[in-house]
Image: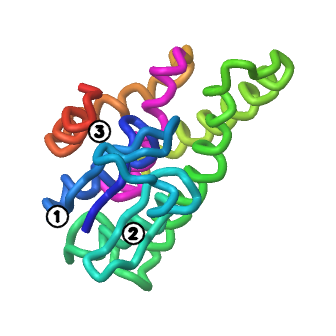
Amino acid sequence: MKLYYAPGACSLAPHIVINELGLACETERVDLGTHKTEHGADFTTINPKGYVPALVLDNGVLLTEVAAIVQYLGDQKAGGIIAPAGTITRYQQMEWLSFISTEIHKQLGPFFRPNLPAETREQQMALIKRRFDYVAQHIKGPFIAGSEFSVADAYLFTVLNWTRFLKFDMSAWPALATYMDRVASRPAVKKTLGEEGLA
């Protein structure tokens, strides 16, 4: 397998899963500005969507989108970091993956635009604060979907980590700060951050 990633982007989530499970997988960095890979390939010929992550399987099949990729990777190792298919825990993990994707990931995206109008920024900030409230209220165990680290945590950690780059004041959500520290202390997460030059 090969994972195409950009440092700190949402591709960090599958990269964490790969390291958590010790899966054999090549990685190749992508410059999202030029759409060139570190070896000079045109990334749009690999993933026509033009964004990471992209996972190319050994048989040549391409998988994209974080929620799909982390579930696929999680299923590669029984008893790993995703519940078995058909269990209620699996559906709860899928529920969190969907929520993180649509309600946090996509809502944080506009903040990376340097020309974001002030009115739009204010509206987005009000929305994302409600989402942070919701997540903070639902971290009952050490991790988002219960007592065990799961693929949902890899994704949630990734998008919450963007608040550091965006210089958000997160003091209203101490539960999220504690959660982030807990996930960041995991050896596989430390390793991944180091590999992406984010440590």
Query: Residue 62 location in percent, x, y?
Result: 42, 72
**Quarter where residue 12 is shown:** top left
Mark toward the start of the polypeptide (3 vs 1): 1
Magenta stretch secondary structure, dominant: helix
In the image, which residues are magenta? 145-167
Callout 1 touching callout 2 (CB < 8 Å): no
To which residue does mark 2 refer? Answer: 71
* Distance (Cα) linking label 2 and label 3: 19 Å
Query: Residue 195 location in percent, x, y?
Result: 20, 38
Between disc 1 and disc 2, the foreground one is 1
Amino acid type at image mark 1: Leu
- Which residue shows up at 67% across the image and 19% down it? 114
Question: Dot 3, how many residues are within 10 Å of its Cα: few (below 14), some (14-19), or many (20+)?
Answer: some
User: Taking the image as drawn, is residue 143 in sight?
Assistant: no
In the rendered view, tell whether residue 132 sits above or below residue 28. Answer: above
- Left or right position of 196 against 32: left
Query: Residue 1 location in percent, x, y?
Result: 25, 68
Q: Which of the two residues, 150 or 22, is positioned nearer the viewer here? A: 22
In the rendered view, tell whether residue 128 sits above or below residue 140. Answer: above
To which residue does mark 3 refer? Answer: 183
Mark 1 element type: loop
Q: Which of the two residues, 105 or 32, is positioned nearer the viewer here? A: 32
To which residue does mark 1 refer? Answer: 23
* Residue 156 part of the magenta segment: yes
Mark 3 element type: helix
- Which residue shows up at 44% across the image and 85% down it? 86
Query: Residue 82 location in percent, x, y?
Result: 33, 68
